Amino acid sequence: MPSPALGRCRFCLSEDVALTREHVFARWLVERLRAFRATRAAQLPADAAADARLARLVTMVCGACNAGWMSGLEVSFRQAVFARSRPDHLAEPTRRTLSRWFTKTAMLVAHSANKELVPEEQWPDLTDTMPDGMRVGLARLRRPRQPLDLEFGYEESAGTESARLTGVAVQVDDLVGLVTRRSSVTPATTLWPLRSHTLRWTTLPVVSRLSDLTGDGAIARRHNPT
Ligand SMILES: [Zn+2]
């Protein structure tokens, strides 16, 4: 093992701390998604390269953040989404957990592709709340063909690589979180900012593909970090 790099943690802003590479998609999730392939998607051609690419995405983080808020967020997300018996309503703590998890994941995925979804000065906000100015939408994907997927949405104006990233859709199983700086998450339902309306797992809007969420008047392309 190479010794970890010393530097500044972008989340807690500690200086000269040991930074290690941590996977954006945690091991438990990657294993869960392999199980998805082995069962529900057995008849589909496995896109092993795409799976491996997602599983390889890493971020640099300090030990305290990794073992602290990140680990806690992961556990909360896992319980919220994959618990055997799940309450029908998405209560406020669950909405917070999902919003933060999808935002953390979307911004790190964008960062690994040299795009900015959440400005770095706002990253520390995620350690206990949500960065200002972000919206999170939630929807279900009809007949997911793969267990994990991503799609980037871009500003309408330019069709080039320099086009500004406006949102990232992250799909886990049949659940899709859209994390965006736009003023609307339509056709998804608003998960963040918190509202008082009742949210139920069973009545989430259903979309056919991720670009239904990222491509609203925007130029959407498949995520391809390499
Ligand atoms: Zn840290």
Image: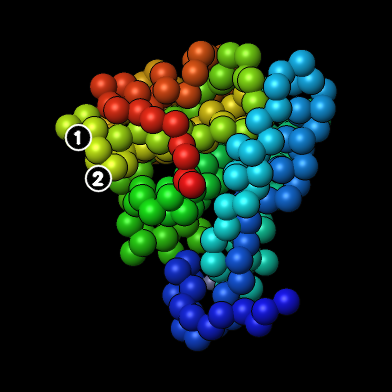
Which quarter of the figure is the N terminus placed in? bottom right
Q: Is residue 8 above or below residue 174?
A: below
Give the crowd class for mark 1: few <14, some 14-19, many >=20 residues within 10 Å. Answer: few
Q: Is residue 21 visible?
A: yes
Foreground residue among 12 and 198: 12
Q: Is residue 205 visible?
A: no
Foreground residue among 206 and 49: 49
Q: From the viewer's perspective, is 154 left or right of 97? A: left
Q: Residue at x 47, y 40 (%)?
A: 224
Discs 1, 2 touching: Cβ within 8 Å? yes
Q: Which mark is residue 162?
A: 2
Residue position marked by numbered label 1 in the rendering: 158
Q: Is residue 67 above or below residue 100?
A: below
Tag 1: residue type? Ala
Foreground residue among 130 and 218: 218
Give the crowd class for mark 2: few <14, some 14-19, many >=20 residues within 10 Å. Answer: few
What is the distance, in whole Å, between disc 1 and disc 2 at their CAs?
Answer: 8 Å
Rendering coords of residue 132 (x, y %) = 33, 50
Q: Residue at x 61, y 66 (%)?
A: 21
Q: Secondary structure at mark 2?
A: loop
Rendering coords of residue 196 (x, y %) = 44, 29
Residue located farthest toward the left when viewing the structure as drawn: 157
Rendering coords of residue 61 (x, y %) = 56, 68
Q: From the viewer's perspective, is 96 left or right of 86? A: left
